[in-house]
Amino acid sequence: MRSKTQSGSQQGPFPEGPVRTCMGCGAKKAQGELTRVALDPEGEVVVDRERRLPGRGAYLCGAGCMTAALKRKAFGRAFRGKAGKVDPLKLGQAWEPGSRS
Ligand SMILES: [Zn+2]
């Protein structure tokens, strides 16, 4: 007789926890899989890895989606026109391998 197997019966199509939408490609993913970007006190869009910045945030899968979001002017919409500055190079560094702090 077999005893109960420890199968991951809780794995469904949707991961647990809050789901966010990438503003670059529109994919819906678990919050932990996306990178949060928010506005720093000067209104510049920065990567908020620790999720500590107050106010509105937006979510991105990676550097490619950051570029897509730029082209779609999604930053302006996500931050309701308050995004003063977006520095693609600086933002892109967040997803470069080996750039751990
Ligand atoms: Zn994306």
Image (cartoon, rainbow, N blue to C red):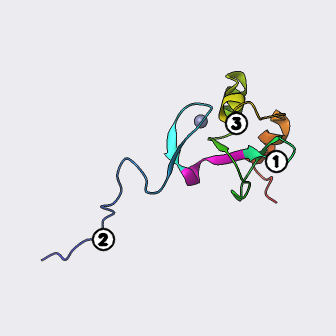
Disc 2 on helix, strand or loop?
Answer: loop
Q: Nearer the viewer, residue 69 or 7?
A: 69
Question: Label 3 near label 2: C-beta < 8 Å?
Answer: no
Q: Which residues are magenta?
A: 31-37
Check disc 1: other Cα within 10 Å, few if <14, some if 14-19, many if 20+.
some
* Image quarter of the C terminus: bottom right
Position above or below: 96 against 5: above
Residue tagged by mark 1?
40
Residue at x 83%, y 34% (from the top left corner): 84
Is ligand 1 within 8 Å of the beta carbon of the residue shown at mark 1? no
| Neighbourhood count class around disc 2 (C-alpha, 10 Å): few under 14, some 14–19, many 20 upward | few
**Residue bearing the label numbered 3:** 79
Q: Amino acid at mark 1?
A: Asp
Q: Measured from the top left, where is residue 59 in percent x and y? A: 63, 42
**Disc 2 designates what residue?**
6
Mark toward the start of the polypeptide (2 vs 3): 2
Q: Quadrant of the N terminus?
A: bottom left
Numbered badge on residue 17: none
Q: Nearer the viewer, mark 1 or mark 2?
A: 1
